[in-house]
Image (cartoon, grey):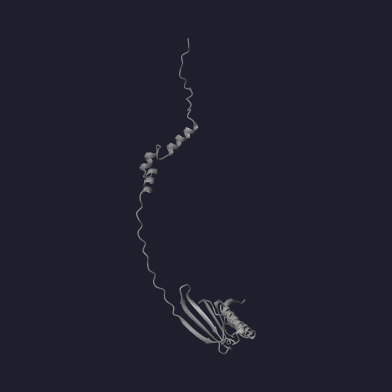
Amino acid sequence: MEPEKHDSPFQRKKKNNMPANKSIQARQQLRDPNTGRFRDEHRQSGMPTDESIRKYEQQPRPPLPPTTEVPLPPAKARQASSRTIPVDGRPGSTLTVQDVPDQTHGMKRHTQFQSPTTSIRLETPISKNINLPKMEKVADDLETWRTRSNEKRGEYDAPIARMEASGTGLNRLTVRPVFGTPPRRPWQPWKWKAWQKARERESLASNGFNYIHN
């Protein structure tokens, strides 16, 4: 006779043979508020779902209201000014300062040093100070150059009457010699070529040259 089979209270429970990857996937689905068991609770709490967010993002946005431009009050125009003063110790020399409106800087300054044989004109912002001693030094250099050039001029060269310089600073200027009345063309035809060459040199020199001062 076979012994009767009795259920033992110590009988082991059956093992769960679910693969590990499926178990992880199942736990993830339970945590997903869109598919898991917390879906109803998630929706009842008022939190948006992926589908509701996607629909909201696909909705056409209302047009923005047109921007309104507020006109700025017109800037107070500064009045132009001009003043001329004599330069001490230099007979016949003057210094003229003109402040005029400018679109870039608001105001710009024209400073001009005048002597009988030299003219220096600067265009600078109104905030830049005038260095009169340095301007006088540049005028002396130009006068020396004019005198030496006249001493070396040829038979048909016109004398240099004035030196005119201009720029935005005394360190670098564009200098143009202003020639006086040239000698008459000689009556001998073989001298006409030399006379014409002198006129061509004067025309080329009138284009100016760079003056650099440290």
Q: Residue furthest front?
A: 189
Front in this rendered view, residue 46 or 174: 174
Q: Residue at x 51, y 86 (%)?
A: 84
Q: How many numbered marks, from 0 up? A: 0
Residue 129 in the image: above or below residue 66: below
Residue 163 in the image: above or below residue 71: below
Q: Residue furthest top?
A: 1
Q: Residue furthest bottom?
A: 91
Q: Quadrant of residue 137?
A: bottom right
Q: Is residue 83 visible?
A: yes
Q: Residue 196: give x, y in percent of width and height.
A: 58, 82
Front in this rendered view, residue 188 or 98: 188
Front in this rendered view, residue 75 or 43: 75
Query: Would you say 195 lies left or right of 23 here?
Result: right
Q: Residue 50: give x, y in percent of width and height.
A: 40, 43
Q: Residue 151: give x, y in percent of width and height.
A: 64, 86
* Quarter of the figure that contains the C terminus: bottom right
Q: Residue at x 49, y 81 (%)?
A: 98
Front in this rendered view, residue 57 or 9: 57
Q: Is residue 134 visible?
A: no
Q: Quadrant of residue 130?
A: bottom right
Residue 60 in the image: above or below residue 26: below
Q: Quadrant of residue 212?
A: bottom right
